[in-house]
Amino acid sequence: MDKNKQYQMETLGVRAGIDRTPEGEHSHAIFPTSSYIFDSAEQAAARFSGEEPGNIYSRFTNPTVRALQEKLTVMEAGAWTECTASGMAAINALCWGLLKAGDHVVSSRSIFGTINVLFETYLPRSGIEITFVDLTDPDAWRDAIQDNTKLFFLETPSNPLTEIADIKLLASIAHERDILLAVDNCFCTPALQRPLTLGADIVVHSATKYLDGQGRCIGGAIVGKDPALQEEIHKYIKTAGPSMSPFNAWVFIKGLETLVIRMRAHCEHALQLAQWLDQHPQVNHVFYPGLESHPQHALAKSQQVGFGGIVSFEVEGGRAAAWALINNTKLLSITGNLGDVKTIITHPATTTHGRVPEESRLKAGITEGIVRLAVGLEAPHDIIADLEQAFKAAK
Ligand SMILES: *Cc1c(COP(=O)(O)O)cnc(C)c1O
């Protein structure tokens, strides 16, 4: 690649971060090695002391993982990336690398369930305070700030109701008080949204989802701008050990090569599904930022390139009707994951959000009738036909 040229996202996905060995391989090499050899005892000492840069041990650095990190850094418009063994490991590295007892975090209430457990149980256990606020209410974020607030954390669009946070506005509120803004960009990926260009300081990913896109591997990443933050996060990863395997990194590199065209297709299919569901007599409401009726359609349009692959809807008849619909599908997969080529159907109230107390769940609008679709890459006609026969059978 020409370092002085600006390439478009499709090109970056395919080409960025490639560092060939002298063998001249066209597809990226995998480096399954736990350690690296030194020419001499002197060199070993220089590497360990940090005097000489270079590989020491794959818990610290690995060339395959580094290639993925370089690709993601360019795609997210950051300055650095640290990869981890899972999305949760990335969020743990963010928290334990940057926070300490006495700090305070403000987080959106609508976040991935396991992050909720981390924030509610493990942060307070280590003396870190947490306040949950509504994703879409900027005044609530401002009002929650304390003198010891260090971090704002959010996910946009939210899961499963696809609410949208105004990243630029929340970044400016955070920065007035020297607070870092971290955005979980799992639903959009850099193909659809680049939070660092909108003012966020850190992006976190569950690479498990769309970055792989084919349901094969668990992985995570943290992308940022300030090198001082990278140093702290890298030190944590190297000490705690949630490092990414080179095999998984290779799968994610291959996933990123097709990210843009996959995300474009996910968006197109999801919009077709959302429009069809919107007309369906057994559906009360559809949640999809691509519909003009979505309360934040304009905001989504301004900060995202596309509206994503997640469509949620509320069926008439509560849990019984939702479960009957799910049980009568023949093509779709009943599982809790998302971001796969295969369309996934989920009942959030009893699975992904089952641990959230009923009162907070209802407050967040996740009723028993809500069904979430992670729309895949099968022909939309076939996805619609499967749901149509399931709706009929569920009546
Ligand atoms: C899945 C997910 C995570 C956690 O990632 P894992 O790879 O499962 O550890 C974090 N955030 C969001 C939005 C997710 O969907």
Image (cartoon, rainbow, N blue to C red):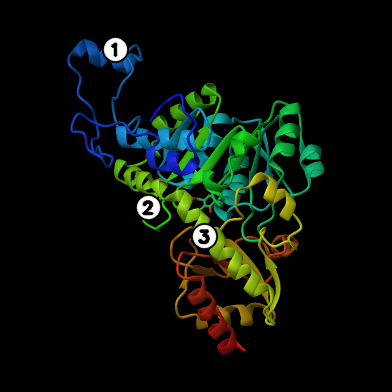
Quadrant where the image shows the N terminus = top left
Across and down, in percent, residue 359 comes to: 73, 63
Q: Which mark is residue 217?
A: 2
Q: In the displayed structure, does residue 148 sit left or right of residue 327?
A: right
The amino acid type, in three-letter code, at marker 3 is His
Is ligand 1 within 8 Å of the beta carbon of the residue shown at mark 3? no
Across and down, in percent, residue 203 comes to: 56, 38
Across and down, in percent, residue 235 comes to: 44, 27
Looking at the image, residue 45 lies above or below residue 309: above
The amino acid type, in three-letter code, at marker 1 is Ala
Q: 327 or 225: which is nearer to us?
A: 225
Mark 3 Cα-neighbour bin, 10 Å: few <14, some 14–19, many ≥20: many
Instruction: Determine whether the residue tagged by mark 1 lies in a helix, strand or loop.
Output: helix
Q: Which mark is residue 46?
A: 1
Mark 2–mark 3 Cα distance, whole angstroms, equals 19 Å
Mark 1–mark 2 Cα distance, whole angstroms, equals 35 Å
Residue at image location 47% in from the left, 33% down from the top: 73
Mark 2 Cα-neighbour bin, 10 Å: few <14, some 14–19, many ≥20: some
